[in-house]
Image: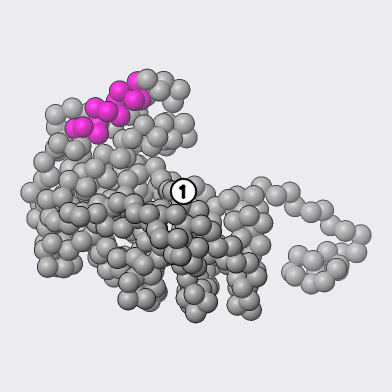
Amino acid sequence: MPDLIDRPVAWFADIGLADRPAVGGKGGSLGELTQAGIPVPPGFVVTTHGFELFLEAMEHHRPVRGLVADLAPDDLDTIRSVSQELRHRVEQEPLPATVRKAVEEAYARLGSGDEAVAVRSSATTEDADDASFAGLQDTFLWVMNTEEMFARLRECWGSLYSVESIAYRRKHSLPEDNVAMAVVVQQMVDARSAGVMFTRSPTSGDKSVITIEGAWGLGSSVVSGEVTPDRWVIGKITGDIATRDISDKHAMQIQAEGGGIREVELEAKQRTTPCLNDEELLALRDIGRRVERHYGKPQDIEWAISQSGQILLLQSRPETVWAMRDATKPVKPPESNPLKHVMTIFGGTQ
């Protein structure tokens, strides 16, 4: 989309990873998955252009970026004070008319005007190959109407100025002028089960397996660590399920009345019942392989299964922990037999 930089809103079907400067890491990934034919809940992104218009209006009153750029990375007291001030300003500032109109029209197009959605931060610096920023910005689930959606949009923008996010940027000397926030607005999944999937073992780095973790209800309980998830390890090629660790899942998170989420205790039988059957595990494995092939590298994937049994992906980002270890691993010196060394490099036997 050549003119994406001038649009306050972009739909998943029109964007991909190449558009990350305009739609952020999460938005770019969801667009990329959509275009690759991977099942993703429909949605749109409030672009960084929309954010820039909003920030420009704010800076007519008082600087924002300059305040952050002048902070010392080790001055946490001042960072906390500036964070509190900026978040309050962002959450109270009216949206420019052009931004409000574009977002309101997109929200109405997504559903009936009162569509339940997830509103998710999508910073331009997150989910890159060399740095994962997951958790430094906000996500809101089961947002139920237009005005609440606008309030959560501003809160996502405000999370760019959280203590953690500011401190991270100052510690790593990231230029403040290059930092912007896009926001994903995505149809909410009424999840029966949800969790994460790694196309490379998170514990051993083994590339021949896929690890799936999940629990009942929304995936927020897994991501936050509130519930110990079930865990399976599956052969990437063979499909053999080598590990089945079924946990005692004492609770699940579901929609709260009027919006948001709440936690409910599970009955004894469901607590120790696997949240996925073997057919679903193998279907997830197949999707994980497709996503890894598309990106050409191991992925860290968020998934959900709807009440009707449909598997949907909520995010995919590059696996970073083992990739960074590989990048810093010393190169093995040539052995005495040069041919043997070449065979080792290209996967031959020793």
Quick check: 286 above or below 214? Answer: below
**Crowdedness of circle 1 by 10 Å Cα count: few (<14), some, many (20+)?**
few
199 and 280: which is toward the camera: 280
Horizontal side of 278 relative to 102 (left or right) equals right
The span shown in magenta is: 78-89
Which color scheme did the rendering employ for the protein? one colour
Give the residue drawn at x 35%, y 20%.
78
Quick check: 190 above or below 119? Answer: below
The quarter of the picture where residue 236 lies is bottom right
Horizontal side of 172 relative to 336 (left or right) equals left
Three-letter residue code for mark 1: Gly
Picture coordinates of residue 90 (x, y %)? 20, 37
Let me know if residue 46 appears in the view. Answer: no
Q: Badge 1 is on which residue?
A: 225
The residue tagged with tag 1: helix, strand or loop? Answer: loop
Is residue 79 on the magenta stretch?
A: yes
Horizontal side of 23 relative to 125 (left or right) equals left
Quick check: 46 above or below 189? Answer: above
Let me know if residue 262 appears in the view. Answer: yes
Give the residue drawn at x 44%, y 64%.
270
Q: Quadrant of the C terminus?
A: bottom right
Picture coordinates of residue 144 (x, y %)? 17, 57
Horizontal side of 277 relative to 349 (left or right) equals left
The quarter of the picture where residue 84 lies is top left
Outermost residue toward the front? 268
25 and 87: which is toward the camera: 87
Picture coordinates of residue 40 (x, y %)? 34, 69
Is residue 214 on the magenta stretch?
A: no
Main structural element of the magenta stretch: helix, strand or loop?
Answer: helix
